[in-house]
Amino acid sequence: MNDERHRVIVIGPTPPPFNGMSVATELVLEGLGGAFDIYHLDTADRRGLSNIGKLDFRNVYLALLHGVEYLRALTDFRPDLVYVPISQSALPFLRDCLFLVPARLLRKRVVLHLHGSDFRNFYEAEPSWFRALMRFALGDARKAIVLGASLFTMFDGLLPVHSICAVSNGIPDLEVNVESRRGSAGPVTVLFLSTLMKEKGVLDLVAAIPAIIQRFPNCHFVFAGEWLRAAEQEDAERFIHQQGVLSFVTFAGPVGPVAKKALLQSAHVFVLPSYHEGQPFAILEALCAGLPIVTTDVGCIKDSVVDGKNGFIVERKSPESLAERLLLLLTNQDLRDRMGSASRDMYLSQHKAEVFVGRLSAVWSAALTADSL
């Protein structure tokens, strides 16, 4: 162990499965492992996305196993800091308490990281006893990270304002050849890349497809990701068959890094009409790939997608609005190219991995040099 570096316990999952949390944890480990002495407590459930946050024997067993490992790490590793990404629903937050409460009782410095934008609603909806538990678990944190300044209010009444920090997500450069798609022959491809679930707007996009094809048939829609619910998958596939648009649609399933890069390379437009988000990594990947983006005003998305500049912001739950804006992009290559270039510029200035790692490192350092506990 290098005694010159501060010791940090990092809690969080790594891929697989690939989702925002696992990708973020992997980036933290790769980016900060050289500057800090890190003990990683991997909380991944390898069974897939559908098991995340559910109460079953396996999840309870994993939570208890991780709790025991954590207590051992607190004793043996003796961290200077504990880094805890926190959840915004009841059962996962109870799991988080296995890490937060011992850290507070042992007076360890803690940095919280909120990757979502619904924490305030979650807190206010819980009964008084649960809110009291949340206040105790969170109340002694040195720093709390949110995705943007618009989310500072997430911790009102829970933490002092001076402890809240905004750190935008970042990703490594995917090195997609942006120029190769310009002027390419063949259909114009629209890419949806996320978990396939109603809350991500996938059914709204499916519903918009017939109207788009009627006016611009030289297009193709690719849905990449894992279906979360079988009933929604059946509804989408039934609609596509009934509307006779099967030849215009591809369901690519879950994709790893190589396949994902290929999809971003071949796409011309990216769409993610979510109902709830924080700052989705799929949006950052589309920025990195130089794609125009059609999305919704949720979470911190507006910090990265400026309506009319590098994409369009549409109403939630509105297939009509989706169809209208997608048609503008599908029928105008110059607009696609201009907005795609603006997306790439946004990535380079705000969301490179180095920018994210530098900001996170600064927060850790500030927490370590704050007033003594």
Image (cartoon, rainbow, N blue to C red):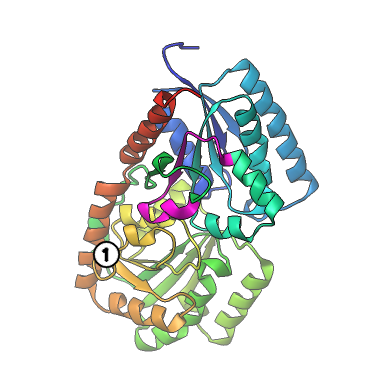
Q: In screen coordinates, is 124 left or right of 247? A: right
Determine the image quadrant of residue 171.
Answer: top left
Name the residue located 22 percent from the left edge and 71 percent from the top edge.
335
Q: Nearer the viewer, residue 43 or 70?
A: 70
Mark 1 lies on residue: 310
In the image, residue 317 sits, relative to residue 61, either above or below, namely below
Q: Residue at x 28, y 57 (%)?
A: 290
Is residue 151 highlighted in magenta?
yes
Q: Is residue 22 left or right of residue 270?
A: right
Asked whether, in this view, residue 32 is left or right of residue 155, the answer is left
**Please, is residue 34 above or below residue 90 in the view?**
above
- Residue visible at 58% across and 82% down in the picture: 239
Picture coordinates of residue 320, whole percent (x, y): 42, 84
Q: Residue 346 location in percent, x, y?
A: 26, 54
Please provide percent x and percent y for residue 189.
Answer: 37, 69
Relative depth, front residue between 230 and 309: 309
The answer to whether residue 210 of the structure is visible from this angle is yes
Residue 324 placement: quadrant: bottom left
Which stretch appears magenta? Answer: 138-154
Residue furthest to the right: 57
Whether residue 105 is situated above or below residue 349 in the rendered picture: above
SS at mark 1? loop
Q: Identify the residue at the far bottom of this view.
A: 214
Type of amino acid under label 1: Asn
